[in-house]
């Protein structure tokens, strides 16, 4: 076993000897990065220069920290009437904002879209703008060029999606890609996107990676459009504590990791294999194709699930579907009070993707009309699967699972439709597990995201949009145990039982069980501390 450490680790180890209790000391290089990120106000220069052993004289800084307190204004500044007015913006105001958006939009790729497609696209822009008030809050140049946290997340998500999209393009090996202007891109649901959910998406047959040309990156135009698209999706995520763009990025990361666990061969190193080993490589790929029900040989399906993870909560309002239905929200009425937020997210994301300025991006994603159909099916199935509060849909999901993966099904269901159904269910498992991945990761990740959700639901309660007060420590503590018992742990067991995820199945289940146990031991005190912080913040706000 070898361990290699660079100068960063050496410097940190030396600086440790010059630190002070309860203070965070940082180097000149880190301070420079913070200033570039416009966080210079976080720095306090040390009056004395330190002399770490072996490093010479150094200028270091203290990181200025403040006690973590929730600003009560995020809850107390609005009431139910304010919330209602923010959701029911006048059509004239939205028209002006849409016009502002149109003037900012940059479609410089030079692509020509036929008149019919343009008209349909304009209708979709209108639909998108009724569902969001975010984009015109940003100046596009400043937003995309600034080195802030959201910009870095945009870059990271773009890089993740590009890796999967490169495989999609490479798998086509020069096939015709004239589908970007196809009317199928501009298809609208007859009544709702739920009508388009399918029992089994059709997956491609086996095709060896050896038949794909080597491709490491998208061309410049497609890459630029991909980043532009991710940036616009980020702009449509609202500034709520939990269902925000950071959450979307966390789900994307989790989906990407699970997908890689599925598609990465374990027995052959493809990078080092020589021509003489090609037969062995093909055999291993064929084995993996069969073990993953065809997912490992379907780059479009792989891209679709990671893409779905990115957009699955776009334009989320910070309240559950039941609240929007009770309030008679426009979006709830539009989607007949069923899977409201999920359908709205699909609508916003698809509407953005069909804009003329993403012509090259659409050509990369889908090269034929049949691929558009499959991509749309995968996207809709995946996002709708995240609506775990719909009892009817949850029951249907359990029925499909048993049809695919109980002992009898594993032995008998080997027809092409049966295999496709298994692959479809596995992809839905990936998005479901990724959506609650914090419950099946390290304890600190679980607590971080659990607290964010706690504050989001408390904000809804204070605004009068919910009758349930999540700040009751006993209630939140007990409900989390129930969530582990009735959803998280059964889901983790399914990851393991499907046999597709290999070691990840055990890993997710073990983390879920460990987090549940630690929550039983520590959870009540943690929630009580959150409640105390809320009380303190509200008292300070009232005294001002």
Image: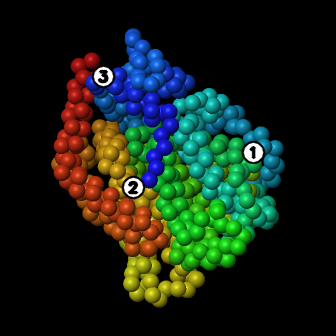
Q: Residues within 10 Å of mark 3 (few under 14, many from 20)?
A: few
Q: Residue at x 52, y 85 (%)?
A: 414
Question: Does residue 475 lie above or below 64 as drawn?
Answer: below
Q: Is residue 118 above or below residue 535?
A: below
In the foreground, 457 or 224: 224
- Mark 2, residues whose alpha carbon is within 10 Å: few (<14), some, or many (≥20)? many
Q: Are marks 1 and 2 in contact (CB under 8 Å)?
A: no
Q: Secondary structure at mark 1?
A: helix
Q: Are marks 2 and 3 in contact (CB under 8 Å)?
A: no
Packing grade of label 1 (10 A; few <14, some 14-19, many >=20) is few
Does residue 430 appear to the left or right of 460 in the view shown? Answer: right
Gap in angstroms between the C-alphas marked 2 and 3:
38 Å
**Foreground of the two, 85 or 185:** 185
Q: Which residue is mark 2?
A: 436
Could you give the CA–CA distance between mark 1 and mark 2, rounded to whole angstroms?
35 Å
Q: Which of the marked residues, 1 or 2, is nearer the chain's N terminus? A: 1
Foreground disc of the pair 2, 3:
3
Q: Please identify the quarter of the rendering in which residue 225 is found.
A: top right
Q: Nearer the viewer, residue 466 or 141?
A: 141
Q: Residue at x 63, y 48 (%)?
A: 352
In terms of sequence position, does the residue under pointer 2 or pointer 3 come before the other? Answer: 3
Residue 207 appears in the picture as rendered: no
Residue depicted at 31% across the width and 43% down the height: 451
Q: CA distance from mark 1 to mark 3?
A: 49 Å
In the rendered image, which residue does mark 3 sit on?
20
Going from N to C along the chain, the mark reached first, 1 or 3, is 3
Give residue 183's position: percent from left, percent from top. 73, 61
| Residue 201, above or below 101 | below
């Amino acid at each position: 076993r070898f361990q290699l450490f660079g100068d960063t680790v050496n410097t940190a180890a030396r600086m440790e000897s010059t630190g002070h209790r309860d203070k965070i000391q940082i180097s000149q290089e880190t301070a420079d990065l913070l200033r570039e990120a416009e966080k210079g106000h976080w720095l306090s220069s040390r009056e004395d220069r330190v002399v770490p052993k072996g490093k010479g004289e150094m200028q270091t800084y203290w990181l200025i920290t403040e006690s973590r307190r929730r600003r009560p204004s995020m809850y107390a500044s609005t009431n139910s009437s304010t919330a209602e007015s923010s959701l029911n913006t006048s059509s004239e105001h939205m028209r002006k904002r849409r016009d502002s958006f149109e003037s900012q939009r940059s479609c410089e790729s030079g692509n020509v879209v036929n008149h019919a497609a343009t008209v349909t696209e304009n209708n979709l822009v209108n639909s998108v703008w009724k569902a969001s008030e975010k984009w015109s809050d940003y100046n596009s140049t400043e937003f995309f060029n600034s080195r802030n946290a959201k910009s870095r997340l945009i870059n990271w998500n773009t890089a993740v999606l590009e890796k999967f999209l490169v495989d999609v393009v490479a798998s086509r090996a020069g096939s015709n890609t004239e589908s970007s202007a196809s009317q199928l891109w501009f298809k609208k649901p007859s009544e709702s996107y739920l009508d388009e959910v399918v029992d089994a998406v059709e997956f491609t047959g086996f095709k060896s990676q050896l038949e794909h040309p080597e491709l490491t990156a998208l061309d410049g135009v497609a890459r630029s459009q991909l980043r532009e698209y991710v940036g616009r999706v980020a702009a449509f995520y609202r500034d709520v504590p939990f269902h925000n763009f950071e959450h979307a990025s966390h789900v994307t990361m989790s989906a990407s990791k699970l997908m890689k666990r599925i598609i990465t061969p374990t027995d052959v190193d493809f990078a080092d294999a020589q021509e003489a080993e090609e037969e062995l490589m093909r055999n291993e790929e064929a084995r993996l194709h069969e073990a993953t029900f065809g997912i490992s040989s379907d780059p479009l399906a792989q891209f679709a699930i990671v893409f779905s993870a990115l957009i699955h909560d776009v334009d989320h309002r910070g309240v559950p579907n039941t609240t929007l239905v009770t309030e008679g929200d426009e979006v709830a009425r539009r989607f007949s009070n069923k899977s409201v937020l999920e359908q709205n997210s699909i609508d916003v994301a698809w509407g953005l993707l069909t804009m003329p300025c993403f012509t090259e991006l659409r050509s990369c994603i889908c090269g034929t009309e049949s691929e558009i159909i499959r991509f749309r099916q995968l996207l809709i199935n995946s996002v709708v699967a995240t609506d775990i509060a719909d009892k009817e849909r949850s029951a249907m999901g359990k029925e499909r699972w048993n049809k695919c993966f109980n002992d009898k099904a594993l032995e008998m269901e080997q027809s092409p439709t049966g295999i496709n159904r298994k692959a479809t269910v596995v992809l839905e498992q990936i998005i479901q597990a990724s959506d609650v991945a914090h419950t099946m990761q390290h304890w600190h990740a679980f607590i971080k995201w659990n607290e964010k959700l706690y504050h989001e639901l408390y904000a809804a309660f204070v605004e009068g949009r919910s009758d349930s007060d999540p700040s009751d420590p006993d209630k939140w503590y007990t409900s989390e145990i129930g969530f582990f018992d009735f959803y998280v742990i059964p889901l983790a067991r399914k990851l393991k039982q499907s046999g597709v995820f290999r070691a990840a199945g055990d890993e997710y289940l073990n983390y879920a069980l460990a987090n549940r146990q630690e929550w039983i031991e520590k959870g009540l005190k943690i929630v009580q501390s959150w409640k105390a912080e809320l009380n303190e913040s509200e008292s300070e706000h009232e005294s001002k």
